[in-house]
Image (cartoon, helix red, strand yellow):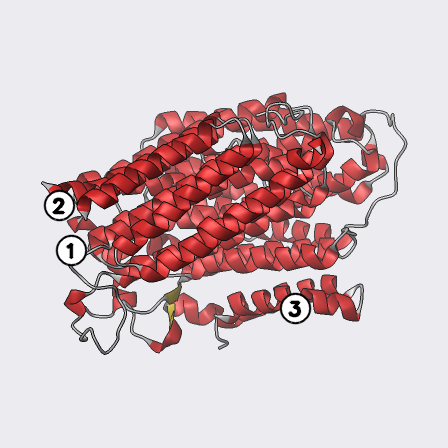
Amino acid sequence: MPLISSFLILIMLIAALAALFFDNLLNSIIAAGLVSLIASVLFYFLKAPDVAMTEAAIGAGLTTAIFVLALYKTERGKSE
Amino acid sequence: MVNLTLIIAIPLLMSFTMPIFKMLNQKLPKVIALLTTAFNLLVLTANFSQIMDSAIIIELGGWQAPLAINLYVGPLALLAAFLINGSAFILSIYNLTQDYKFDDKFYLLFLMITAGASGMVMTGDLFNLFVFIEITSIAAYSLTAFAGRDSYEASFKYLVIGGIGSVFMLLGIGFTYSAVGSLNLAEIAASAGLINPLLLQITALLFLIGVGIEAELFPLNFWVPDLYTEAPTAVSGIMSGAVSAAGIYALARIFFTLFPAQSFLNYLLYLGAITLILGELIAYQQKNIKRMLAYSSLAQMGLIVAVISLGTEGAVRAGLFQLVNHSILKILLFISAGVLISAAGSKNIDDLAGLGSKKKTAAFGFTIAAMGILGVPFLNGFISKFMIISSSLNADQFLLTVLILLAAVIEIAYYLKVVQKLYFEDLKIEVKKTAVITIPVVLLTLMIFGLGIYPQLIADPLEKAAAELINNGSYIMTVLGGM
Amino acid sequence: MLNFLEEWSFFGGSILLILIGLYGVITRKNMIKILISLALMDTGVNLMLVALGYVKAANAPILNSVVQTNTAAFVDPIPQALVLTSIVIGTAVLGLGLALVIKIYDKFSTLDISKIRGLKW
């Protein structure tokens, strides 16, 4: 169990770095969504199921959605 | 006595019903904003004498103090709440003559900023303080963007720096909670001595970053000039008059009541002095009048923080008096500068030449307020400057006194330059039609002269507020009872 | 050893996440990336708060018929309540920021903050 959470945290940090260094914005946004998703699993490990639900719905779901929406209203929308 | 929670509740209620009022009548939002702020002032006045006697504590939800979120309204909070709601009231009068594109949304956010800033000064709970800071800043981010074009960028910059600040503040709250096990300000203050000194230092630094952004302290204030330059005049006014006052209040509450230690106050003293001198020097070089006012505002905030953190009772009183004066004077400066700018169609100081004979009220307001900031006798700025200098001499801070005097000299140079341009140069441009601002200018001028000639008017509240800040034992006792 | 690793990987991980976010906010030029970095910082601080309230071998702070009302067996619920508020506030700020990004893009046709005319600092 401890190794699982440590491993997840490692993946989360790699995803966070990837979100910063990807050239493609859509990939960045998906990596940031992955960070939120792993965070919500970690919240569950920390015995905070309510926070985990909120983070999964708002942090990973809604935030990613508005980022993608904003992306399509700006650069993506122009190129097509 | 009227329940003080209404000061937060009524503006919030009115703000979110604003679109309905707009549907009833196009003009209604302006009037509602004016009435709401006037109502807040009335509530504060009705409670004035009781709060001067002893602080009012309202326990929300009917639980006892350390458990429930409580509101604490002592003399200091009363003073700050008067400043915030007074600024909002005056600016609502000014707004009566203004037209905004989405006016229901503008007044929605305007009342939200009032409610948030009032909440900031009244709350007795650390996390509640954070929530109110966020309400205030989110309203401020969007209000800034109302001027269009360049204001979007100013707003974005403020949003990013404000977001970083809120993360640090939240981290500080987390550390405090894990060390003390409570979020009640009084309970944290009572057990602050038990916190591990290293953790206390880190926590204090985190709070300094989080709240310093609202209080416009030196390394964190680079967003301020952009915001004040690009935002609509009323927004610059309320940011300078109300939000920064609430920021100073939160800073004072954290560093006097929560973690009272001379070493932190010394850091604040240095930061304030640096802010003061840098602000004045940059203000001197500005060609844009609003940017000049913004840097001058920064410098004044630095002065207030530096003086308050001297930590003696006289110095705190002088700093609070300067805070009151600064709010009054800066609002007058911003609204008269706003009229002058729209008359000239340019923000450049050189283009304002000769407007003194055409826009008499605005030029008069600007001149009176500039004189007030410079500290001309019989105006309110004179007395607070005098108190500041005498208290800093009493505290044996010779260097600080020299810096304050130096800053005053630079101030004289750049304010008189504008006044001289207004009155003693020929008109070069075509004067455009502008809004009428007679009522706010008259009201503010009366206040400036009133406080200047008869400062005893505010002496009692100031003294009690200073005593409340210096002695955090009484704050703890009042909230927690005889624990 | 393993318990030690578990405990500190949460604190270390959340602090690193905050630092990565801070680095991103300062160095990235693309406005959407700046906001992504801000979101990372928010997630980091939320994780930190919940980890601060964690008690070993305790239950989730929910009362039901299975778990008896022995409060010592619960993790601290207050940080969790704070984090719920903080998540919502963070999302509101991000939404507002993205709206501003769209507006700025309409005016300047770029997402690069350094290419916008630039108010002086």
What percent of the width, then of the height, locates residue B455?
52, 52
The residue at 66%/43% (across/down) is B145
What is the number of the mark on residue B195? Answer: none
Circle 1 packing at 10 Å, graded few (<14), some (14-19), many (20+), is few
The local secondary structure at tag 3 comes to loop
The residue at 15%/55% (across/down) is C56
- Give the vertical position of C53 relative to C34 (above or below): below
Q: Are marks 2 and 1 in contact (CB under 8 Å)?
A: yes
Q: Residue furthest left?
A: C1
Whether residue B52 can be seen here = yes
Q: Residue furthest top?
A: B285
Which chain is mark 3 on? Answer: B
The local secondary structure at tag 2 comes to helix
The amino acid type found where label 3 is placed reads Thr
What is the number of the mark on residue C56? Answer: 1
- Return the residue at label 3: B17
Residue C47 or residue B215, whichever sits in front: C47
Comparing labels 1 and 3, the label whose residue is closer to the camera? 1
Q: Quadrant of residue B350?
A: top right
The residue at 17%/75% (across/down) is C68
> In the drawing, does residue B127 fall left or right of residue B378?
left
> In the drawing, does residue B463 fall left or right of residue C30?
left
The amino acid type found where label 2 is placed reads Asn
Residue A74 or residue B401, whichever sits in front: A74
What percent of the width, then of the height, locates residue B16?
62, 65
Whether residue B76 can be seen here = no
Specify which label sits upstream in the sequence, 2 or 1. 2
The amino acid type found where label 1 is placed reads Lys
Comparing labels 3 and 2, the label whose residue is closer to the camera? 2
- Return the residue at label 2: C3
Which chain is mark 1 on? Answer: C
